[in-house]
Amino acid sequence: MGEEFLSKIKGNNATFVIHSDAGACAAAAVMGNIAVRSQEEGSYFCLSDDFIPMVDDFASKEFDANTAPDQIDVNFKNDWIEYLKNTGFPANSLEYKDCCTPEENTMRFLNVCRRIPAMKPRMVHESRELSIPNEYRLDYEKLMVLIKTGDNLNPYLSRDILKKKNPDKNDLLLNSWGIQHLHFRTEGTDQLLFCVIAESDVFVIQALPHNEEYLWVNTQLVEILHRNWPKLILRAKHNGLDPEDIQSAKRHSLRRYNANFLVTVSDGTVYLPLAVGTMASGDSMEDWVNCKKIFSELEHYQNIVVQNALAIRTALNMPASQKLVVRIAFDNRVCCLYEPTRATRIGGFTSTHSA
């Protein structure tokens, strides 16, 4: 796979490239892995009867419920856009870009949500290989306290997050392998701490010099995960592909072009990209799949509302002369339906799943 080819497709947001001696077999393995993961994880949204927002806040005088009574006023895609503009982006110190499509803005939102861990207590697990330089031992201990108590880790994350004010920039290591890097001090350090930050746990891998050659494609990070927490990366393990040795310089070149590659660890185990991988655009494949889910599910929920308009009218005791208005409210991935002219939540659709 030559650099001329990679340079031509770099930036394509609908292309996924993986380099392997196995050729098409590796591509098929990755696509199969992505399909299985997507099915296991299910829908992006959870339509809930329990999530009850302050619906009075959503009630708006802009609706004239007596206009065009034969129509239904429902546009869940627009509701999602308004959520991103008013809640999702501001919560992450970002602004909605009107020059971008709703899908592009959604990708930005999904990216920053992965890059910035939620502030919640997590258990710390240290690898057997972990070696912290004496200079940063106290800093490391303070950092672990922050993790265990659920404090804000943003000052210790990539410089893009706070100093460069570019939190939606793609982190290729995170997109490819699901590995975060932390600085020992808020001003930045010459050593970086590599870890996987999960929902309730942090798996501390190793500290490595910031200026180490080929640092961002160092397969020792994968090796340590394999030795210490094989179940954590089990979904990326593939038994049908032969081991192959891709040199550091080649891995570096591939990563630079947003191309993916297999990793073979010391015992011959072969891993696909641990975090599904990177699109040729540099975006996360996981985010790309979730973006597709989001708009598919919004369309599905909207169709369900249209099909059940009569039942909703009856439940709301709404006269036939009045237009039915239905909106969707979001609390991250949890959502609910409501009627804004009456500030009334609409339930009974929690068993509905998108096809």
Image: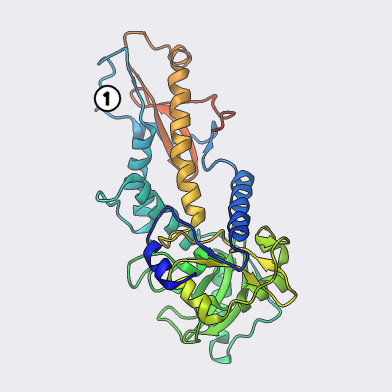
Q: Position of residue 332 (x, y in %)?
A: 47, 46
From what the image shows, is residue 238 above or below residue 350? below
In screen coordinates, is 158 left or right of 215? left
Identity of the residue drawn at 49% across and 47% down:
290
Q: Nearer the viewer, residue 298 or 87?
A: 298
> For this rendering, which residue is in front, 19 or 323?
19
Task: Note whether residue 95 is visible.
Answer: yes
Residue 126 visible from this viewpoint: no
Residue 106 locus on image (x, y percent): 39, 49
Residue count near mark 1 (Cα–Cα under 10 Å), binned few <14, some 14–19, many ≥20? few
Quadrant occupied by the C terminus:
top right
Q: Give, as a three-letter code, the residue at label 1.
A: Phe
- Residue 272 drawn at (x, y percent): 62, 63
- Nearer to us in this view, 1 or 78: 1
Image side of residue 217 versus residue 342, left or right: right
**Image position of 313 with respect to 150: above or below:** above
Residue furthest top as drawn: 320
Please, what secondary structure does the residue beneath circle 1 have? loop
Horizontal side, residue 223 vs residue 144: left or right: right
- Outermost residue, right side: 267
Residue lying furthest bottom:
134
Hey, which quadrant is residue 146 in on the image? Answer: bottom right
Residue 90 position within the rendered picture, expressed as x and y whole percent measured from the top left? 34, 53
Identify the residue at horizontal 58%, vertical 52% (top origin). 31
- Residue 164, by quadrant, is bottom left
Residue at the spot of label 1: 63
**Total label count?**
1
In the rendered view, would you say 312 is above or below 97?
A: above
